């Protein structure tokens, strides 16, 4: 490390160029972070889907309801350890643009099924006891300024109350996500509130949106899914069961190419920027080849000169790129920029590692060619070039 | 020598010598072209989507939904309500058949594999009566024929056929029902072309809807007749409905996706723009640095500092405009008309559309390139103007 000072002085000889090269790399890696976030958002967090959970929908499509009575019947299928249901409520707060996912669930089994939603014990208890109670993720609570005990009116275009008024819920809990990428913007309430309001309306009282099933043997999940569907085959309400990962993936594929197109374009351009920056860095070394020859004259070995040059370019890359990765990470961790539509906007840790590898790669790639050139050069030729 | 001709002379000299600084100039051009490509490409997604949605509506056509519903998907109207709506004033009458151009429609979702991925997608399946063809006069069958009333037959939009596994002559199975594809229709490239149509009377029992619909689309005698129609329906005590113009309805349906794409597009473009400005600054500084002696010589010959400054700025703007035009052209060639389908967040169903690189987007892209050039050239230009002549002349 005794040469660090030499590297440092070299960087300072053209302060402006060094500064802007650093800044370009810095921005490029912030961009990398944003890109990673967008990619994660458009795959809807498929990476965090529960491996031991199945999702069962009506065969005709997600907009058809499934009879609630199917729940207990599925318990008999081998490999099924737990069953709960959920119903898309589609409500908004105050205006239609205040969008967030809200679902009618069976509180206790639901939280058992999704341990990734962490609700403090005392809040859990009060929620279970209050049929008009609800729990909501922290980002959504903060977005609307809701606190525990607040009564919030929601309007559901799908389920109009018979009296025409809004549905009023009491916030009983604010949950947090156990892992990054888990959608913590959703709002859950007790389905019995809905069923009781619509007592006598079979269509709503006796049906749910979909079922979530836990299986004891995830490698065998596909077979269990088939067995469940077989149970309801040839009934008026046939079903379609798939693993949660497949379900999320299918849903993400529906959004289609948009995510991948945005990612592809930006990745291509990011690559170009890195190429350009790399070229600038290489240029600044090429300009100094005669100096490298002087170093060799002074007795620096070929290997040392090579090392010095590489050290310099890697140093620049790590300084700019490292800061860029960090700021990108902070930016993405601040959450969804679209106000609720891309809840899975997060920075998978894996991509930090990929980013770090790109930083080092950039440094080596930019330095290696001029470094070898310097290495091969005969001292006399190099000195004469000027 | 006046100031203008000084600027022209120095700028011409700069531009003629760009060739000697090709490498670093190319850096600036490529950086800025990249920003413009991303900016235009991402926003063209939003523009294209909005275009198909807006073209789906015509201003003299209205949609009647249940009060409180925000989309056709969440709406519901009984057969009797649909009849009452058709009797309202200002609806066009006297077409063939029973008169009023008011079409009660059912909208459900069918799972159809997407051609690009092979996985199921939510394709809108619309149940209609013969009146639907009275309301949507721009709809025409381009292949095959219309479905016959009472039969399990469907017609598919041109875009739906392109994006999803729906071939003329084939049949599809949804739940217990099998449907034959007997025709393909087009509707001026609007969002309707992403739909599948069937006889509402066949669809109702298949989806257990009794005699209910979700919306009534009605053609009015004139655009101005909207208020008459709306007042008649909203004051009718037997109805609790919401009346919107088709154009407003579809424009509203495109807000979420358009918003997301804009946030992403502008976000990425601003970040990249900052990066590109840094690149341009670097380029222009090195352009000034390599010409230190030339600039000093010019100054010694009597050229003014401002002329030198403007010439550097002009060079930066020129490079960035080249970048902007190249980026705009590439984005146009690569993305304009690129077709794809995505899910409309507001109805959870698929809409096929083509990316639209509009003139407005191209202008925005090139204008932003000019701004980047200006920012990138400013500091180097100031430095060029402030070069101390004597020391600069002495420089190697």
Image (tube, coloured by chain):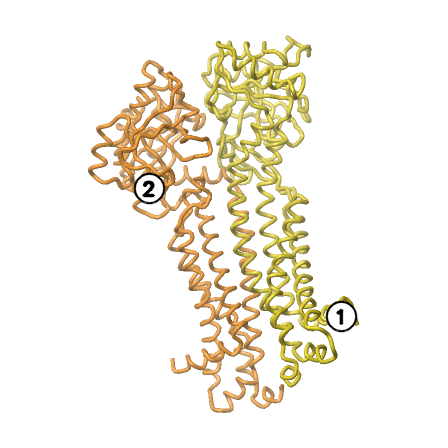
Chain colours: A orange, B yellow
Q: Which of marks 1 and 2 is in front?
A: 1
Percent of width and height locating residue B39: 58, 50
Residue at the spot 37% in from the left edge and 55% down from the top edge: A349
Label 1 – label 2 distance at C-alpha: 64 Å
**Position of the C terminus of chain B by quadrant:** bottom right
Q: Nearer the viewer, residue A214 or B68?
A: B68
How crowded pointer 2 is (Cα within 10 Å; few <14, some 14-19, many 20+) is rated as: many
Percent of width and height locating residue B275: 54, 60
Q: From what the image shows, is residue B35 above or below residue A176?
A: below
Q: Mark 2 points at which residue?
A: A138
Q: Which of B152 and B32 is in front in this view?
A: B32
Label 2: state its secondary structure. Answer: helix
Count of labels shown? 2
Residue at the spot 45% in from the left edge and 72% down from the top edge: A315
Q: Mark 1 points at which residue?
A: B6
Q: Nearer the viewer, residue A61 or A155?
A: A155
In the image, is A76 to the left or to the right of A101? left
Q: From what the image shows, is residue A305 above or below residue B250?
A: below
Picture disc at residue B295: none
Q: From what the image shows, is residue B326 above or below residue B355?
A: below
**Position of the N terminus of chain B by quadrant:** bottom right
Q: From what the image shows, is residue B375 above or below residue A53?
A: below
Residue at the spot 38% in from the left edge and 46% down from the top edge: A47
């Amino acid at each position: 490390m005794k040469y660090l000072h030499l590297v440092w002085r070299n960087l300072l000889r053209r302060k402006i160029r060094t500064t802007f090269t650093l800044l370009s790399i810095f921005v490029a890696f912030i961009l990398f972070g944003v890109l990673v976030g967008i990619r994660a958002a458009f795959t809807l967090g498929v990476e965090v889907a529960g491996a031991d959970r199945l999702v069962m929908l009506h065969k005709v499509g997600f907009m058809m309801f499934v009879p609630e009575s199917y729940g207990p019947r599925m318990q008999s299928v081998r490999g099924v350890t737990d069953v709960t249901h959920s119903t898309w409520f589609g409500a908004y707060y105050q205006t239609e643009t205040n969008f967030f996912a809200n679902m009618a669930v069976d509180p206790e089994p639901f939280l058992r099924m999704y341990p990734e939603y962490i609700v403090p014990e005392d809040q859990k208890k009060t929620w279970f006891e209050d049929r008009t109670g609800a729990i909501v993720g922290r980002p959504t609570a903060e977005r609307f300024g809701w606190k525990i005990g607040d009564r919030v009116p929601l309007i559901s275009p799908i389920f109009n109350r018979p009296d025409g008024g809004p549905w009023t819920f009491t916030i009983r809990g604010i949950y947090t996500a156990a892992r990054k990428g888990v959608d913590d913007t959703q709002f859950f309430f007790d389905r019995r509130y809905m069923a009781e309001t619509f007592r006598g309306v079979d269509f709503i009282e006796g049906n749910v949106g979909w079922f979530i099933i836990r299986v004891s043997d995830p490698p065998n999940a596909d077979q269990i899914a088939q067995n469940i569907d077989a149970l309801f085959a040839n009934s008026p309400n046939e079903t379609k069961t798939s693993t949660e990962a497949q379900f999320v993936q299918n849903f993400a594929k529906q959004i289609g190419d948009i995510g991948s197109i945005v990612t592809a374009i930006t990745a291509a351009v990011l690559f170009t920027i890195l190429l350009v920056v790399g070229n600038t860095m290489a240029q600044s070394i090429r300009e100094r080849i005669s100096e490298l020859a002087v170093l060799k004259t002074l007795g620096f070995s070929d290997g040392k000169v090579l090392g010095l040059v590489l050290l310099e370019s890697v140093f620049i890359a790590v300084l700019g790129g490292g800061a860029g990765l960090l700021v990108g990470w902070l930016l993405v961790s601040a959450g969804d920029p679209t106000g609720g539509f891309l809840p899975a906007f997060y920075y998978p840790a894996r991509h930090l590692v990929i980013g770090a590898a790109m930083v080092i790669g950039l440094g080596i790639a930019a330095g290696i060619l001029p470094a070898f050139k310097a290495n091969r050069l005969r001292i006399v030729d190099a000195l004469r070039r000027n | 020598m006046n100031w203008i001709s000084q600027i022209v002379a120095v700028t011409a000299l700069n531009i003629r010598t760009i060739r000697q600084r090709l490498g670093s100039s190319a850096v600036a051009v490529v950086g800025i072209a990249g920003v413009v490509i991303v900016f235009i490409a991402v926003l063209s997604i939003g523009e294209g989507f909005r275009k198909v949605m807006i073209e789906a509506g015509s201003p003299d056509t209205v949609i009647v939904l249940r009060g409180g519903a925000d989309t056709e998907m969440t709406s519901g109207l009984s057969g009797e309500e649909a009849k009452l709506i058709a009797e309202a004033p200002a609806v066009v009458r006297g077409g063939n058949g029973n008169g009023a151009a008011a079409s009660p429609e059912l909208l459900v979702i069918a799972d159809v594999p997407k051609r690009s991925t092979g996985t199921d997608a939510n394709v809108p399946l619309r149940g209609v009566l013969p009146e639907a063809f009275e309301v949507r006069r721009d709809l025409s069958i381009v292949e095959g024929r219309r479905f016959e009333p009472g039969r399990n037959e469907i017609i598919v939009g041109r875009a739906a056929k392109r994006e999803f596994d729906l071939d003329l002559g084939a049949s599809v199975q949804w739940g217990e029902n099998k449907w034959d594809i007997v025709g393909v229709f087009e509707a001026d490239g609007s969002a309707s072309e992403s739909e599948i149509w069937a006889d509402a009377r066949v669809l109702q029992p298949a989806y257990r809807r009794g005699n209910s619909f979700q919306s009534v689309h009605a053609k009015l005698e004139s655009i101005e007749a909207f208020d008459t129609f709306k007042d008649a329906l909203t004051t009718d005590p037997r109805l609790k409905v919401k009346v919107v113009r088709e154009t407003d309805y579809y424009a509203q349906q495109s807000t979420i996706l358009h918003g997301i794409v804009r946030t992403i597009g502008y976000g990425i473009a601003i970040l990249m723009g900052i990066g590109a400005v840094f690149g341009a600054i670097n380029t222009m500084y090195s352009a000034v640095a390599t010409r230190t002696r030339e600039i000093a010589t010019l100054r010694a010959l009597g050229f003014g500092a401002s002329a030198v400054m403007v010439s550097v700025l002009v060079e930066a703007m020129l490079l960035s405009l080249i970048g902007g035009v190249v980026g705009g052209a590439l984005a146009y060639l690569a993305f304009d008309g690129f077709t794809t389908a995505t899910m409309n967040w507001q109805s959870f169903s698929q809409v096929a559309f083509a990316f639209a690189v509009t003139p407005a987007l191209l202008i925005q892209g090139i204008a932003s390139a000019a701004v980047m050039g200006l920012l990138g050239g400013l500091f180097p230009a100031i430095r060029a103007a402030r070069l101390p002549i004597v020391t600069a002349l002495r420089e190697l």
